[in-house]
Amino acid sequence: MIVVLCLVCWGCGGGDKLNRCSVEGTVKLDGTPVDNGFVSFKAEPGTPGPDVAGQIKNGKYSLPLKAGPVAGSYSVTITASVPTGNKIKAQYTGKEVDEYKQLIPPQYTGERGKSILNAKIVQGKNTVDFNLESEMKLISP
């Protein structure tokens, strides 16, 4: 009886009652893997889970089951900064530091309102790839 109780408690996942899913994928900008950045999944209305985020390294990201989103709809934002080669004074310390600029266009970062990226996460393992473009292309009729 004690062994069964211990096994049941062990399978509870440390008190996290959410039924999480794993998500992995690639992030490319103009066909080139994004070297370093972040991908964030923000729960849309009707999706009960928390917002989650993961780091992009060498064009890939992975949110394991323990840290992943729950099944549902998400707005996705992607950010990645690159050094400009210039030095600037840090706001609080006044020390010279490297200046960085956002590599990802604002339509994907949520900088100018909502990101145009969405993802539908289903129960289990998910692969969601993002192929971003620097310039929006207009589709003519």
Image (cartoon, rainbow, N blue to C red):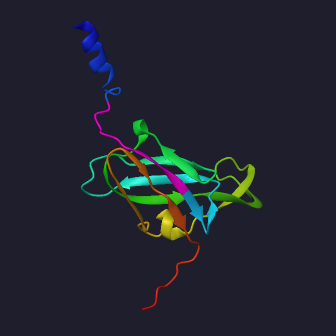
Decide: is 109 above or below 141: above
Position of residue 72 measured from the top left corner of the image (x, y, whole percent): 30, 53
| Residue at x-position 47% and y-position 70% | 112
Decide: is 39 above or below 3: below
In the picture provided, is 105 more to the left or to the right than 47?
right
Residues 119 and 78: in front is: 119
Position of residue 101 measured from the top left corner of the image (x, y, whole percent): 65, 62
Position of residue 48 measured from the top left corner of the image (x, y, whole percent): 27, 48
> Total marks drawn?
0
User: Per the image, is 80 magenta?
Assistant: no
Decide: is 126 above or below 106: above
* Residue that protrudes farthest toward the left in the picture: 1
Instruction: Kindly indicate the quadrant of the structure image that contains residue 118.
Output: bottom left
| Residue at x-position 46% and y-position 64% | 110
Residues 114 and 118: in front is: 118
In which quadrant is the C terminus drawn? bottom left
In which quadrant is the N terminus drawn? top left
Instruction: Kindly indicate the quadrant of the structure image that contains residue 80.
Output: bottom right
* Residue that protrudes farthest toward the bottom in the picture: 141
State which region is magenta: 16-26
Position of residue 64 measured from the top left corner of the image (x, y, whole percent): 45, 40
In the picture provided, is 114 more to the left or to the right than 62?
left
| Residue at x-position 38% and y-position 54% | 42
| Residue at x-position 38% and y-position 49% | 51
* Residue that protrudes farthest toward the top in the picture: 2
